[in-house]
Amino acid sequence: MSFRKRGEIISNGGKNTLPNNRIPNAVPGRGSPITSSIPRRGNIPLIPNRGQGTQPIPGRTQVIPNKRNLDLNESFENLQIKENEELSFKFPKILKPSSLNSSMTISTGISDLDKILGHQGGIPLGSSLLIEENGSTDFSSILLKAFASQGIIHNRLNPQQSNTHLVVLTSNIQWGKDLPGVYRGSSRQIKKQAIRENEEKLSIQNLVNKPQIDKDLRIAWRYGLNDSNKREIQEANDEIYKDFNHQFDITSRLNPLVQNNEISYIPISNNFIQLYQQIVQVLESQKNKIIRLIIPSILNPSMYSPQLTQLTEILPFIHKLRSLTHKYPQLIIISSIPLDLYSKSSIIVKSMESLFDTVIQLEPFNQQMLQFLERAYKNEPNKISHGLLHIFKLNNQSDAGQMLITKNEYSFKNGRKKFEIEEWGIPVDDDATTAENDENKQTTKDIDF
């Protein structure tokens, strides 16, 4: 018996015997392995009749990486940005970039509503808005008509090229004749505006009367009077987007009236499929315009048959409308629903809320609350609010998982000049406080000594 060191080659077929040559990780009697080197791991023998990773395993389909799938998200974002840039160049005066993402926004016709929708500039293109309303009032119709009037005003900015088209799902073809007109101001405001425009005109008299600003005058920064840059930026933005939003007077009517080429009425039939097909036909014929789709009082029994109010009928229709906002990025949908007919906790309302991008609710005050406000603001009737506005869902932000439900934080009032939305605060009833103080007063007379 002979003992040899491990790894030493015994023989090589009688040729070129290397008795004292050691090969790392060599197995006695097997000769020198043919390997591919791996750092720090020695050499691994290859399996016969198999290439070095180039041959697929029998019975398995070779997977080839698809570059299109790898870059799907990136290309989708680039496509969305490209579409927004094209829309902004096509409609520069009526669109405003969102402060949250790359989407373009358009005005709802209510400046206060534009501010609270989360984008600081209205509602994004390719989205939908649902307005819920309690009670027997019809404040939601004011929002819908202001939304429509804003579209008509935008469409008339350039007489040579129309940019907006209205689509209304209603059997009332007179609906467009009640749209509010632009608020021109009181007679005093009109005179002041004329004087201001006359002063802004370049003339020798205006240059002579214009006071010269002392260059040596310095005002302390703490008074905030030297924020000229901020004011200039704000004025520049107002000048760029001066046609983005308008103020409407509900006591006046749009003049001239809406023309047939500016609005399309789709009568409500007994079949949602037919309604959907008619909407698609209008969208195809108005591809180069911004489409404002308005659905007043959806599922109202006075307009919709009992068959259409079933959950199995309305949900597929809303699903298809939602798909249209993705297919046609220039489409905006706004609808209202009465909560007295369909409870907010019902499955129909909950399902519709999940399919709309933005959901707000109008809750008018009852008679007792209105009487309290009238007493509190008896000297300032313009401060009396008509109800509360709740926000349950905001576009893009709620989809990302943010809890943006705000209740009892905003109030609304419908005035002659405009529909106002402001922060809500319960006023103090001065009459009740005065009566309580009178009861606590001392009734006995003071005795003089």
Image (spheres, rainbow, N blue to C red):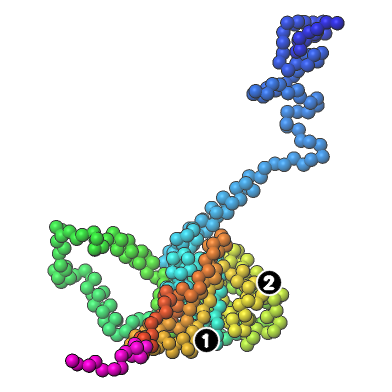
Labelled pair 2, 1 in contact (Cβ < 8 Å): no
Name the residue rendered at 26%, 81% in the picture: 191
Work out whether residue 87 or residue 19 is closer to the camera in this orientation and state it: 19
Displayed quadrant of residue 129: bottom right
Depth check, mark 2 against mark 1: the one in front is 1
Work out whether 295 lies above or below 28: below
* Residue on which the image places disc 2: 316
Displayed quadrant of residue 169: bottom right
Q: Position of residue 59 (x, y in %)?
A: 82, 39
Q: Answer with mark 2 or mark 1, whichever residue precedes in sequence.
A: 1
- Residue span colored magenta: 436-449
Name the residue rendered at 24%, 60% in the picture: 222
> How many angstroms separate mark 2 from mark 1 (CA)?
29 Å
For mark 2, give the secondary structure.
helix
Q: Amino acid at mark 1?
A: Thr
Q: Magenta-highlighted stretch: main secondary structure? A: loop
Work out whether 188 lies above or below 218: below
* Residue on which the image places disc 1: 137
Judge whether residue 28 is colored magenta. Answer: no
Work out whether 101 lies above or below 137: above
For mark 1, give the secondary structure.
loop
Q: Position of residue 27 (x, y in %)?
A: 78, 16
Name the residue rendered at 21%, 69% in the picture: 202
